[in-house]
Image (cartoon, grey):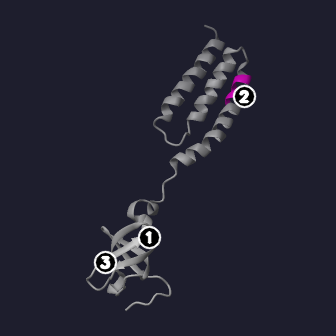
Amino acid sequence: MDSNDAVHIAWVVLAVALAVSEIFVPGFVLLPFALGAAVAAIVGFAGAEFAWQLASFIVASAVFFAALRPLAHRLNRVADPQGVGANRLLGEAGIVLDRLGPDQPGLVRIDREEWRAEAVGGAVLEAGAHVEVVEIRGTRVVVRPRAGEVTS
């Protein structure tokens, strides 16, 4: 085995080691370099000098890094918790179906869903009043009158 073969094998070992390490490091940080090392190994096995192998490693790694970063950002994006479950209702408009009063929960329609509701501060809201969800309390929404609505 001559020194060129050792370099080719080193590129392959580096590619495999970086690819396996990517499993433990989130965000596609090592994968572009693993792919760059694989390209350098292919260039080396094709008979290119070490300088060309190194150049192909650098260029290929940069290209793969630039190509995979947007994907990594898309996959690692944290969903807005406000848009999940009942929290998605915060700020939404609804209509009172059953009168709300102090210690008297009622029913509101938000979009096409009906929810048990309480009024902020025990306000009285009659059926038909337009409300806005300001809080989620267990399985109930807490609502307040929309701007321009009059409470009793």
Amino acid type of the residue that numbered disc 2 sits on in the rendered structure: Ala
Queried whether the magenta region covers residue 140, the answer comes back as: no
Residue topped by disc 3: 106
Specify which label sits upstream in the sequence, 2 or 1: 2
What kind of element bears circle 3?
Answer: strand
Name the image quarter holding the C terminus.
bottom left
User: Alpha-carbon distance for marks 2 and 3?
Assistant: 71 Å
Q: Position of residue 97 (x, y in %)?
A: 36, 77
In this picture, residue 66 sits left or right of residue 146: right
Query: Where is mark 1, residue-wise?
Result: 90
The kind of residue tagged 1 is Leu
Q: Which residue corresponds to the image point at 49% horizontal and 54% vertical from the top-left? A: 78
Q: Are marks 2 and 3 in contact (CB under 8 Å)?
A: no
The image shows residue 100, relative to residue 1, as above or below, that is below
Magenta-span inclusion, residue 55: yes
User: Who is closer to the viewer here, 39 or 142?
Assistant: 142
Q: Would you call the spot at circle 3 few (<14 residues within 10 Å), some (14-19), or many (20 or more)?
A: many
Judged by depth in the image, the label closer to the viewer, 2 or 3, is 3
The stretch in magenta equals 52-57
Name the N-terminal-most of marks 1 and 3.
1
Mark 2 → mark 1, Cα distance in angstroms: 54 Å
Q: Are marks 2 and 1 in contact (CB under 8 Å)?
A: no
Residue 95: give x, y in percent of width and height.
Answer: 42, 77
Q: Position of residue 122 (x, y in %)?
A: 32, 85
